[in-house]
Amino acid sequence: MRSLAVWKFASCDGCQLSLLDCEDELLPLAGALDIAYFLEAGRADVRDEYDLSIVEGSITTAEDAERIREIRAHSRRLVTIGACANAGGVQALRNNASVEEFVGLVYANPGYISTLETSTPASAHVAVDFELQGCPPDKGQLLELISAYLNDRAPMLHAHSVCVECKRAGNVCVTVAHGTPCLGPVTHAGCGALCPSYDRGCFGCFGPMEAPNPGSLGAWMTTHGLAERDVVRLYRTFYAFADD
Amino acid sequence: MTERILVATALARVEGEGALHVRVRDGVVEDVRLRIYEPPRFFEAFLRGRAHTEVPDITARICGICPVAYQTSSMAAIEAACGVEVPAEVRALRRLLYCGEWIESHALHVFFLHAPDFLGYASAFEMARDHPAVVEGALRLKKAGNTLMRLTGGREIHPVNVRVGGVYRAPAPAELAAAAAELEGAREFAREAIAFTAGLPFPDVEEDFHFVALREPDRYAIESGRLVSSGGLDIGPDEYEDHFAEEHVEHSTALHSRLRGGERYLVGPLARWALNRDRLPAPVLAAADAAGLEPVCTNPFRSIVVRAVEMHYALEEALRLIGAYEPPDPPAAAVPPRAGTGCGWSEAPRGLLWHRYAIDGDGTILDARIVPPTSQNQARIEQSVRAVVERHLALSDDELQHRCEQAVRSYDPCISCATHFLRLEIDRG
């Protein structure tokens, strides 16, 4: 049976919780995979090699930069899940600020805190075999990823925009109909067009789609009355440091 | 003096990462430190400069297990700063979403993180082989909580349908009927879970606690209330900093909170039960009484029984709220920005969560302060672990380590949230 390890770096635990949230599939999954290392679920079996490593969280300390290299060296496949592991996450908002100032704002004794200047994705440090997007990733997509791995096939996951999912869901376009600013045209599919289904614009929590045109969308939003400051805020949240 | 040093791996079944360091010299426990080495993420810093309407989406990301708590406390603080009181229908919908989070988070802790400890399993996966009905029931209950969160909040983890002032789209009553059906399906298991947890083998421990929790005049406090304590405090959210202080200690990236006089205190299920037992409906109290839960429980290991009582309550309360549901129309109150400072709080599954924001006239966040439950409990957890070590010095390192880990887990620490987590090191002289 192939072994699974789940690793956590700087994060909210939400991505690995997505796995524990697969209530109907969790026990069959535990039967199909040898869950070797998954601290939140109580497994801490240190081995020389894991067949599949799932990584959550971003690299923000020198120790973690070393730890991700060790995990890579002991993993046959390494998959990163979520905005933090794939793009540095919301905590990458430090990357264009002064981390010293940030430490000073939060902690009374900055000398006790050891942290890197930037929050970076795993791919900035090691080779990554697959990136599953989302803050948090969709449970169905996570299961598809593991299922594809167990069956030695490529995962059926698409990199088109949220707009395609909106059309499939039969949603009325929130931008066209109501002028609501929406990042759907540039955002990676996977959520099932969640926000527009709740009458709100997409805020980009699945990161950039394949070949997005954020400049064009940003200009459109500005000409339709959104202040430039708000356009910048919209783009700079959960995937602010993603490559596009 | 002989030295005996024990180093264990990262503590399992807590949310986040940390270690426990215990130093014993000549049979005397000199120092107990819960080391949180979860890397700091600086939410309070990067919230500065954001729009007041963006805050609940951002603060949700502090914790994947209790995002609704972060969203709710931050919305309360911002609405207070802007001088807006949301309508009763919005408050009821927020409480309903929050019930989903209590069910999901407590089910995770009770059955996946904590119960395996008492029954001698490393994880719920092993427990499932001998106790399939318990684990299957737990999954059904957890799923019902998650379904409720999805149908009200749009998504279980980091809900999208919450906003300052209310929600984006009020769910139709028919949508909530699907959640009610799942809750009904888990109802009997939730009631039986109280007796299951009460039957676990507990160490015989009594500790002195200074309990702190929110309290409401007419219901068990979840999404709002006034702060009360076993020491006689009765304060509003704006007075929090007059009575509580955070300190930054060297071994932790989580700040430690204490009462201004230096006293350690406890938030969470034990505190809520001790202070708000009289706010629970009679059938829930009867189930707790039948399981033998004392009116004030001072055995931290028995907090699992209180969590089970709270799950049962949250499920019944959710069904009541769905039955009485009236969609807020409009779905959200307007919250125009206004220069000022506002404080807000709520009862996260792990305890009190307090937020304070200073905002500018155009809604820009100038300053943010967030005090999560685990930072408030950290000093008290260390005290509890010290008592465990003192009682069990004769045990082998392995056994002592297990006891300490179990003590820490009984508090359900959420280290991701508090970092602003656990490896055990026992150093015996």
Image (cartoon, coloured by chain):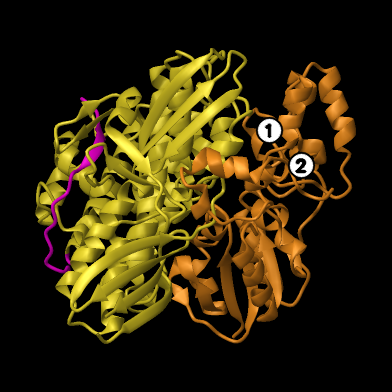
Chain colours: A orange, B yellow
**Is A12 located above or below residue B2 in the figure?**
above
Q: Check whether the beta carbons of the residues at disc 2 and disc 1 lie within 8 A of each other.
A: yes
Q: 10 Å neighbourhood of mark 1: few (<14), some, or many (≥20)?
A: many
> Residue A170's spot in the image, x, y percent?
73, 35
> Residue A199's spot in the image, x, y percent?
65, 28
**Is B102 located above or below residue B399 in the figure?**
above
- The part of the image, by quadrant, that contains residue B426 is bottom left
Position of A130 with respect to B152 (left or right) is right
Rendered residue at 35%/31% (across/down): B321
Residue type highlighted by circle 1? Pro
Name the magenta segment's main secondary structure. Answer: loop
Position of B252 with respect to B46 (left or right) is left
Quadrant location, the N terminus of chain B: bottom left
CA distance for labels 2 and 1: 9 Å
Q: Which residue is mark 1?
A: A196
- The part of the image, by quadrant, that contains residue A143 is bottom right
- Quick one: which residue is furthest to the front in this view? B1
Q: 10 Å neighbourhood of mark 2: few (<14), some, or many (≥20)?
A: many
**Is A212 located above or below residue B17 in the figure?**
above
Q: Tell me if residue B208 is in the magenta stretch.
A: yes
Label ID, residue A162:
2
Q: Tell me if residue A204 is in the magenta stretch.
A: no
Which residues lie in the magenta part?
B199-218
Regarding residue B340, the answer to whether it shows in the image is: yes
Position of B40 with respect to A191 (left or right) is left
